[in-house]
Amino acid sequence: GKKSKIQSTWGKLIRILLATKYPMKIAMDRERVRAFQIEHFGRTNADHSMLDLMPLPSGSINKWFYSKLGMRHLESRDAYQRQYRPQRIELFKNLIAKHKPKAVVLCSFSHLRSVWPVLAGGTFRKIQIEGKKIYYRKGGYTHYFVIPHPAARQSLRNEFWFGTGCFIRRTIASKCIRTPSHGGTLGFN
């Protein structure tokens, strides 16, 4: 409802989304972020999508609760990823090919050298935003951005998330950039 708290991970992603469309005053406004979370974020009729690469929830990367189920492909996080990651990557590639989003935001540096290049069709180049790094690649119609996972423990200020959204907005609008992430993706049209 109207008194809902802004979920910390979602709030950062929402600031990116808002910054792709609105000036800083709107994208940084807590009440606008809260309203977007309540009314628009991740909805089936939204202009963006929220997808998890490996969607089984876990409180931390060091905990794995699913081994108790007695299923071989869930006996460990590694077994789960070996079984399902290739299928999930292929699913995401197909969704991107079908819907042709202008941008895909990949959350997590841990997949920068392994998963994200397979998904995006090549390597990424480093870019600085607010003194922090993100990575970028143009692949066909889609611009791919690798950002720190919003739930990671680094201390990134809201200005970083806003700056990332502004960079995405400028990149999508520009034709001049041409270059050869538990993770997730945020794609929008």
Image (cartoon, helix red, strand yellow):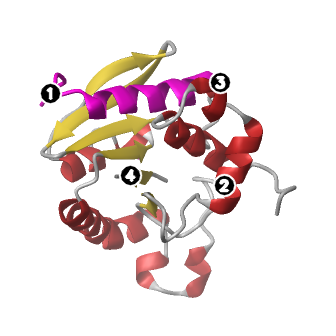
Residue indicated by mark 4:
188
Q: Are marks 4 and 2 in contact (CB under 8 Å)?
A: no
Q: Amino acid at mark 3?
A: Arg
Q: State which tag comes first along the sequence, 1 or 2.
A: 2
Residue indicated by mark 1:
179
Q: Main secondary structure of the magenta part?
A: helix
Q: Amino acid at mark 1?
A: Thr
Q: CA distance from mark 1 to mark 4?
A: 21 Å
* Secondary structure type for disc 4: strand
In the rendered image, the residue lying farthest to the bottom is 70
Which tag is nearer the camera, tag 1 or tag 2?
A: 2
Which quarter of the picture shows residue 63? Answer: bottom right
Residue indicated by mark 3:
157
Q: CA distance from mark 2 to mark 3?
A: 19 Å
Residue 9 shows up from this direction: yes
Q: Amino acid at mark 2?
A: Gln
Residue 155 shows up from this direction: no
Q: CA distance from mark 1 to mark 2?
A: 33 Å
Q: State which tag comes first along the sequence, 1 or 4.
A: 1
Q: State which tag comes first along the sequence, 3 or 1.
A: 3
Q: Residue at x 39, y 26 (%)?
A: 167
